[in-house]
Image (cartoon, rainbow, N blue to C red):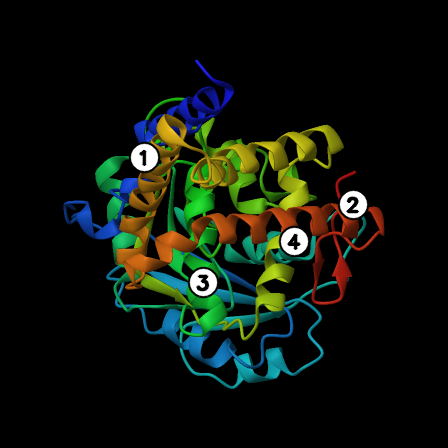
Amino acid sequence: MSAGVLWGVLALAIWLGILATGFWLCTERDDRVNLAEPDVWPEVVAVIPARDEADVIARSLGSVAAQDYPGPFRAVLVDDNSGDGTGAIARGLSGRVSVLAGAPLPARWTGKLWALSQGIAQAGTPRFLWLTDADIAHAPDTLRRLVGIALTRDRRLVSFMARLHCETWPERALVPAFIWFFMMLYPFNWINRRGPVSGAAGGCVLVERAALEAAGGIAAMRGALIDDCTLGALIKRQGPIWLGLTDRSRSIRPYASAGEIAAMISRSAYAQLRYNPAILALTILGLALVFALPVAMLFAGGTARLLGLAACALMVLAYQPLLRFYRRSPLWGLALPLVAGFYAWCTLLSAWQHVRGRGGMWKGRAQAGAAR
């Protein structure tokens, strides 16, 4: 067997293995869970950290206040030392929302987690805490759905992967892949069953307060840059969790350019690799084998080309369910190798920013070293 055929067999085997995980089918969705209505809806307090969100806070906070939740519900917005009037705008809105001025950021905390910690302390003792970002707008029945899944499925944590803004050309090319790669790293179908795999999506998380306290509270993860998946891991030790796609929660933060998307990715990519150069090298090699090798085989001859073509076909196939969810053309599947190259570059950029002391940059704060 020639070397070309061996490489082709490897490319095909990799994609057969990827398809076997089932993550790409996008079966874990909130609208596919059959819910039972409880006799009594438990108390919920939403906690929303916000720093310099004046352009989106009225819409996002308004969607929280407009929830049609049947049980006791209120919200606390923590104004994390904003300089653009975010707190003033929030205070001017009517509804079930109180605004808390955040204290200065202490050492070894990331800004978001410090704000959440203050908001949770203000929340009192509800059964559930709804942790949601200031740039997410929710349908009126979102909280009802979150609590319904938690009660029906007996979950300590329920998280919705908010639909990201996907209208500009850079967003169409790159944003669905962001979700797809996240699902590859944290398969929703594995997270939602027994086992060690865990994760969450930080834009919309419902967590049982008692489980969070048993896990050590927000302080147990105070320096985590990838706070959502860290929270998912902590809570899964307390009991089962659930993560799924949704149309109910949507990001209202647009990305006008590929540079803005690169900044979003590079903020936490190296943290995902534990700031380890060896893991970084293996990751780049892995991306090359998964996405570049099948394309390279197309330029080989005979059987190697056929194997490469089969691997490329599986690659395009695996991207289709998420493209349908985002209502994007199936032809974007052909661009996945190029998109993977962009994400590899963003990962290298993340490592370079960390070396320069600018890792985890967000709203003027370099946070990558908070827990180190």
**Mark toward the viewer: 2 or 4:** 4
Query: What SS does tag 4 mark?
Result: helix
- Residue 264, by quadrant, is bottom right
**Mark toward the viewer: 3 or 1:** 1
Q: Is residue 159 left or right of residue 104?
A: left
Disc 1 target residue: 310
Mark 3 touches mark 1? (CB < 8 Å):
no
The disc label shown at residue 173, or none = 3
Disc 4 target residue: 266
Type of the residue with mark 2: Gly
Residue 242 makes an appearance in the image: no
Spatial separation of the CA atoms under disc 2 and disc 3: 31 Å
The disc label shown at residue 369, or none = 2
Mark 4 touches mark 3? (CB < 8 Å):
no
- Residue 49, by quadrant, is bottom right
Reading the chain from its start, which is encountered first: label 2 or label 4?
4
